[in-house]
Structure formats: C-alpha cells, structure tokens
C-alpha cells in the first residue's frame, strides 16, 4: 500500500482550500489548511509535512517568498505552486529557486491526485552501513528534516530488498568485509539509474574503488565525517529532479 501524505494547502481563498482538503482527504491523505504564508509557517514550525501546495499570489507573502522561508525550516520539502496566470515572472522565479512545479487553475483534479499518488511511492532514503552509531545519527538528522529512512547494517541482506522502496541509497564502500563496490554492481544490474551516494571514511585507501564506482554511475562520493549541509543539498536536488519528472509525466 502506498504511503499516505501529510499535505499543507496554502491559499487565501478558503473555498479553494476547503475543496482541495475534502478531495485529498477522501483519497486518504492527511490535509492541513493555511490561509496565508504566515499561517503556513506557524504550522510548519510544529508539524512535518510531505508536500506543500500553495497559491502563488497571496496578500502579505506570495508563494515564492513562502517557498524561501519553508526551505530554511524544512530543507527538501517539496513545494508545488498553483496559479491562474499562464505566464508570470513569479512562476519563472519560483522554478529557478527550486519549487517542484506549477499547476494551473482551475486544477485538473485527476492530474493532482496522480501526482500525489506518485509522490507517495518509493520515498525512502536507504543507508547501507555497518556503523550503527553513524546510521542512528544520520537517521535522526534526516527524519527530523522530513525524510523517511531505512537502515541496513546486515551485509548479507538481499540487494532487491534494499532497492525496492529506495529513492536514494547511501552506501558505505567498506561494508563489514563486503565491498560496497560489489553491492553497487549488483544494484546496477536492475537499477541502472537509481541514485547511489557512496560513503567512506578512507579517502586515500578507497580511491580506486571510488573511481570505479563513479564509472558505473554512482551519483557522488561523500567522505566521513559527512558535511550534513552538502548531503542535504544533494538530497534536495535529487528529490527536485524526481518531482519535476513526475509532474512532466502526468
């Protein structure tokens, strides 16, 4: 069963938020309504959301300004804008600054529901590492920022179980006697484009393995201790690429 989402709808038109809330709630999602940007920021400060659907033109704070503020509070949070204007400078600016996409009003409800159904699939970041302390720390950091995380510390786990629900994999290059490069090769047999970030605390020793991993489409290599802001920026970029692909395919 697909994970149901917690969605924040932001619009100064209360009839719009109520209608969308009713439709999305009937589809099983948890919906919270906000009537302004400041109202949305207040709700974000106490709750973690999977997505924000916001009108682009509102009094006090427009949707692009709201996106900037939300990015500070919950990095990587997908924001989709709604607009009744076919061409607008705010739309261009929002896309340049990282909003996932723009839906035209009046909304195509089937399109909208299809987007959220796709968004709910395969949203887990899988951490494959035998350092349990590292895993727990990174798990706490990512979950606090709204990511769903799965930890794999058993080197003998089936690769298919690792990849079945993964959006991104963080894979240690030296995994309890098993080469992370060999695990990556197994992943690539059935998942040639799944983003895999290689991780290692042995920069010099693992240089040949790092180069080999990059040659078979590892997305990047990160070094311990991890630079968390760099990791979060990378995850946000990968998520944005995926979301824009979902919107393009609908």
Image (tube, rainbow, N blue to C red):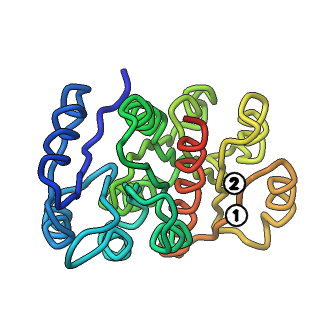
Give the crowd class for mark 1: few <14, some 14-19, many >=20 residues within 10 Å: some
Image quarter of residue 160: top right
Residue highlighted by disc 2: 173
Camera-nearest residue between 95 and 118: 95
At x 46%, y 42%, the residue is 124
Q: Nearer the viewer, residue 61 or 135?
A: 61
Q: Look at mark 1 in the image and give the residue it sits on.
A: 221
Which of the 4 image quadrants contains residue 54? bottom left
In percent of width and height, residue 152 lies at: 50, 40
Residue 250: percent from left, percent from top:
54, 35
In the rendered image, the vertical position of residue 192 relative to residue 94, given as above or below:
above
Q: Is residue 29 left or right of residue 151?
A: left
Q: Say whether disc 2 or disc 1 marks the residue closer to the N-terminus.
A: 2
Viewer-proximal residue among 54 and 174: 54
- Kindly indicate whether the residue at mark 1 contacts the one at mark 2 (C-beta within 8 angstroms): yes
Q: At x 51% / y 44%, what residue is drawn? A: 126
In the image: residue 225, left or right of residue 147? right
- Residue 225, how many percent across, how many down? 54, 73
Label 1 SS: strand
User: 194 or 223, which lies in front?
Assistant: 194
Q: Report helix, strand or loop for mark 2.
A: loop
Q: Residue at x 51, y 73 (%)?
A: 97
Mark 2 surroundings: few (<14), some (14-19) or many (≥20) residues within 10 A: many
């Amino acid at each position: 069963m697909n994970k149901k989402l917690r969605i924040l709808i932001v619009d100064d038109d209360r009839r719009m938020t109520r209608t969308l809330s009713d439709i999305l709630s009937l589809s099983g999602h948890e919906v919270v309504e906000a009537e302004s940007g400041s109202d949305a920021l207040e709700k974000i400060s106490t709750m973690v959301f999977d997505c924000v659907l916001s009108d682009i033109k509102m009094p006090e704070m427009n949707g692009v300004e709201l996106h900037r503020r939300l990015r500070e509070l919950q990095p990587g949070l997908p924001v989709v804008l709604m607009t009744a204007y076919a061409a607008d400078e705010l739309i261009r600016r929002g896309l340049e600054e990282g909003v996932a996409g723009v839906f035209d009003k009046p909304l195509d409800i089937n399109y909208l529901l299809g987007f959220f159904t796709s968004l709910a699939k395969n949203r887990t970041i899988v951490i494959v590492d035998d350092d349990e302390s590292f895993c727990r720390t990174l798990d706490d950091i990512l979950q606090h920022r709204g990511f769903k995380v799965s930890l794999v510390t058993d080197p003998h786990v089936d690769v298919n179980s690792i990849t079945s629900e993964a959006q991104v994999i963080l894979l240690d290059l030296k995994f309890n006697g098993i080469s992370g490069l060999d695990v990556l090769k197994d992943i690539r047999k059935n998942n040639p484009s799944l983003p895999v970030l290689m991780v290692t605390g042995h920069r010099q020793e693992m240089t040949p393995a790092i180069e080999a991993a990059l040659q078979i489409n590892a997305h990047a290599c990160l070094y311990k201790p991890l630079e968390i802001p760099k990791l979060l920026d990378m995850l946000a970029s990968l998520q944005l690429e995926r979301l824009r692909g979902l919107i393009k395919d609908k």
